[in-house]
Image (spheres, grey):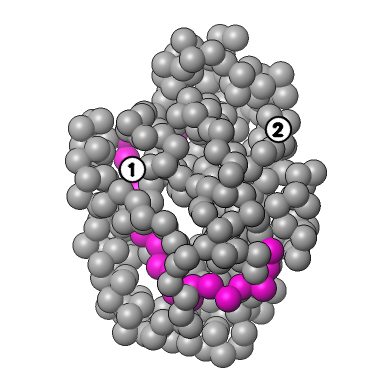
């Protein structure tokens, strides 16, 4: 396969067919640099040399009734991590300020649970309004399942973007969760878009899915046309049902990122959970297809510190693009 042909097709706005998608995922290690170069052509065409940094806030940890097999906070998990209720407004403001100091473009507030209660929304919207008054940073929320009215309240408080990942293909979804469905996730994204929120939605690779599943969810994400696509790689956390699943290579991760760039050429593609665990010494190469990273850890796992990330970005010849009002 001539990967430059795939880049040209992507730049022209055309969707890769399944044979072309499979050629990316099944490419040989010896072809990896050619594949990355082709994906970089697309990335540079639409995103230039900019990198967006994001910082997560685990604003409520644990005690979730959902049975997502990959998650340390799920009802099925016996993982060892800190559990606590919704943190207070002052703590959220302080975390937002720390995110700004890390040169984050976006501060991502995440809560465990099926979805927010009315009391949760009251608390969060008040905190978000306070953040917007004091910190020059964009805000994304990931709060579980939402309806349009709830999404509208977040929008009015100053949230720009809602995260709710598809996680995997519709076919494979019952293998990773039984307490809600793939369609439930689509409904939440539709509610967010109906409320005027931008969409952040992506996938988790390395859960036992097939290449066809990777292609299916990647095409589904393309057709949703979100603004941001986080690409996670399963971090097998002890105490979770998927603790023994660990087969991804750095090359597998890079191929998935390249496929996502070809299918979502203009989107912000973020290397998310599992970046440090799976990419290891090849992390800098992820910046060829991706233009965004998380720093300073994930929800219950540590991650690359922001100063180390700054250095990686600079060493690769990229430039951090921060958030600026107006």
Instruction: Indicate the secondary structure of the residue bearing disc 1.
Output: strand
Disc 1 vs disc 2: Cβ atoms closer than 8 Å?
no
Q: Disc 1 and disc 2: Cα gap in Å?
A: 30 Å
Which contiguous range is marked in magenta?
46-67
* Residue 69 at x, y percent in the picture: 65, 56
Within-10-Å neighbours for mark 2: few <14, some 14–19, many 20+: few
Q: Could you tell me how many numbered marks the image carries?
A: 2
Residue nearest the observer in this picture, 99 or 171: 171
Q: Specify the quadrant of the image occupied by residue 100.
A: bottom left
Q: Which mark is residue 89?
A: none
* Relative to 36, residue 275 above or below: below
Residue nearest the observer in this picture, 202 or 194: 202
Is residue 48 inside the magenta stretch? yes
Left or right: residue 310 compared with residue 164: left
* Residue 269 at x, y percent in the picture: 48, 42
* Residue 136 at x, y percent in the picture: 29, 68
- For image coordinates 54% across by 13% down, the residue present is 28
Left or right: residue 109 compared with residue 137: right
Judging by the rendered image, the residue that carries numbered circle 1 is: 51
Which image quadrant: the N terminus? top right
- For image coordinates 77% across by 60% down, the residue present is 178
* Relative to 14, residue 56 above or below: below
Q: Which mark is residue 210?
A: 2
Is residue 82 inside the magenta stretch? no
Left or right: residue 192 compared with residue 326: right
Which image quadrant: the C terminus? bottom left
Instruction: Indicate the secondary structure of the residue bearing disc 2.
Output: loop
- For image coordinates 66% across by 59% down, the residue present is 68
- For image coordinates 47% across by 75% down, the residue present is 83
Within-10-Å neighbours for mark 1: few <14, some 14–19, many 20+: many
């Amino acid at each position: 396969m001539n990967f430059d042909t795939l880049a040209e097709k992507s730049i022209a706005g055309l969707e890769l067919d399944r044979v072309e998608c499979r050629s990316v995922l099944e490419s040989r290690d010896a072809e990896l640099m050619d594949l990355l170069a082709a994906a970089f052509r697309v990335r540079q065409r639409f995103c230039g040399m900019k990198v967006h940094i994001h910082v997560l806030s685990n604003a409520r940890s644990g005690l979730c009734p959902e049975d997502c097999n990959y998650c340390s906070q799920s009802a099925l998990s016996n993982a060892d991590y800190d559990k606590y209720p919704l943190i207070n407004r002052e703590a959220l403001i302080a975390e937002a300020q720390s995110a700004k100091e890390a040169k984050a473009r976006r501060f991502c507030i995440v809560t465990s649970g099926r979805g927010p209660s009315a009391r949760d929304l009251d608390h969060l919207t008040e905190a978000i309004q306070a953040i917007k008054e004091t910190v020059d940073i964009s805000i994304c929320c990931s709060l579980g399942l939402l309806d349009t009215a709830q999404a509208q309240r977040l929008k009015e408080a100053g949230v720009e973007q809602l995260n709710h990942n598809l996680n995997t293909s519709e076919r494979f979804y019952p293998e990773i969760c039984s307490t809600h469905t793939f369609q439930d996730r689509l409904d939440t994204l539709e509610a967010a878009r109906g409320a005027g929120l931008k969409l952040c939605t992506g996938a988790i690779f390395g859960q036992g899915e097939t290449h066809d599943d990777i292609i299916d969810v990647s095409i589904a994400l393309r057709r949703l046309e979100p603004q941001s696509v986080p690409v996670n790689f399963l971090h097998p956390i002890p105490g979770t049902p998927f603790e023994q699943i660990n087969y991804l290579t750095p090359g597998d991760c890079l191929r998935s990122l390249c496929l996502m760039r070809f299918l979502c050429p203009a989107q912000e593609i973020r290397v998310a959970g599992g970046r440090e665990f799976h990419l290891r010494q090849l992390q800098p190469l992820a910046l060829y297809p991706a233009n965004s990273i998380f720093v300073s850890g994930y929800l219950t796992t540590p991650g690359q510190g922001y100063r180390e990330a700054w250095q990686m970005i600079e060493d690769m010849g990229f430039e951090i693009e921060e958030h600026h009002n107006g």
